[in-house]
Image: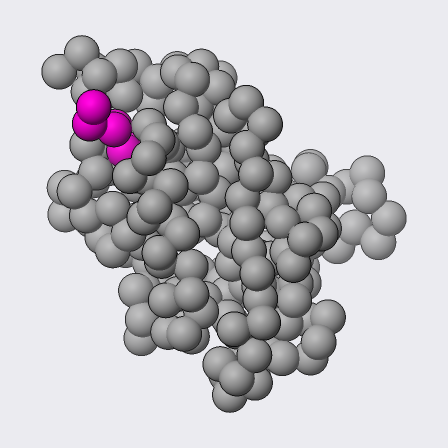
Amino acid sequence: MKTINIAIDGPSGAGKSSISKAVARELCFVHVDTGAMYRAIGLYALRHDYLERETIEAHIGEVEIELKFIGTSQHVMLCGEDVTDYIRTPEVSMAASKVSAVPAVREHLLGLQKRIASENNVIMDGRDIGAVILPDADLKIFLTASAEERASRRYLELREKPDCPSYEEILRDIEQRDYNDMHRDIAPLRQAEDAVLVDTTSMGFNEVVERITAMVREVMNG
């Protein structure tokens, strides 16, 4: 039986992970957050001071990434440790942006990502899913919002945590990551030619989930 693959791409802070997770839950699909994989490698690089390209290339073979699914909920395992709750800080986000530009890192994860998609109905989100990882996806969506709106959402998400960065710091981090992701040599962030653009700047979370769920249902009923 053919699996259904949905690719959702977009910049940092666009809500790809939370929206994809909600849609996957609604449709009983598996949600694959590829950004979490890169964040886990970024966390490993931070912990071991492997942030230079040469050091991460030399040590990428040591990094064991596994996704465990409880229902449609994804847990990220790093060398046997569940790091799901440790990979959402701005520091890890910037480290993920650095390591994701290293070809050896992308190659390290490619096989795992493609295998999951071949075995399950998936909603996979990231930055190059439609263009590189799942070029034959049944539906491709490019999810975005203004940098200011993305920074505001991230600030609201982090403000209750100790040492929460300021809105201005978060905005600078998002703008820097956007630049890094769009200008890297390997698989830069871009909208696939056949992807549907969904700008959520003025949309509520539930509104976005309902719209994308309806789009996926159209594919399923195709």
Where is 200 relative to 91, above or below? above
Which residue is rendered at x = 31% and y = 75% of the image? Answer: 185
- Left or right of 85? Residue 22 is left
| Residue 46: image location, x then y, percent | 68, 71
Which residue is rendered at x = 54% and y = 22% of the image? Answer: 71
Where is 76 relative to 47, above or below? above
- Picture colour scheme: one colour
Main SS, magenta residues: loop
- Left or right of 59? Residue 85 is right
| Residue 194: image location, x then y, percent | 14, 41
- Residue placed most toward the observer, 140 or 176: 140
Question: From this viewpoint, is residue 182 visible?
Answer: yes
| In magenta stretch: residue 157 | no
| Residue 136: image location, x then y, percent | 16, 42
- Left or right of 161? Residue 97 is left
Query: Dividing the picture into quarters, in which one does residue 138 lie?
Result: top left
- Residue placed most toward the observer, 132 or 82: 82
Q: List the single residue furthest toward the top.
A: 221
Question: From this viewpoint, is residue 196 visible?
Answer: no
**Residue range of the region highlighted in magenta in the rendering:** 1-6
Which residue is rendered at x = 62% and y = 79% of the image? Answer: 50
Query: Dividing the picture into quarters, in which one does residue 95 lie?
Result: bottom right
| Residue 53: image location, x then y, percent | 50, 83
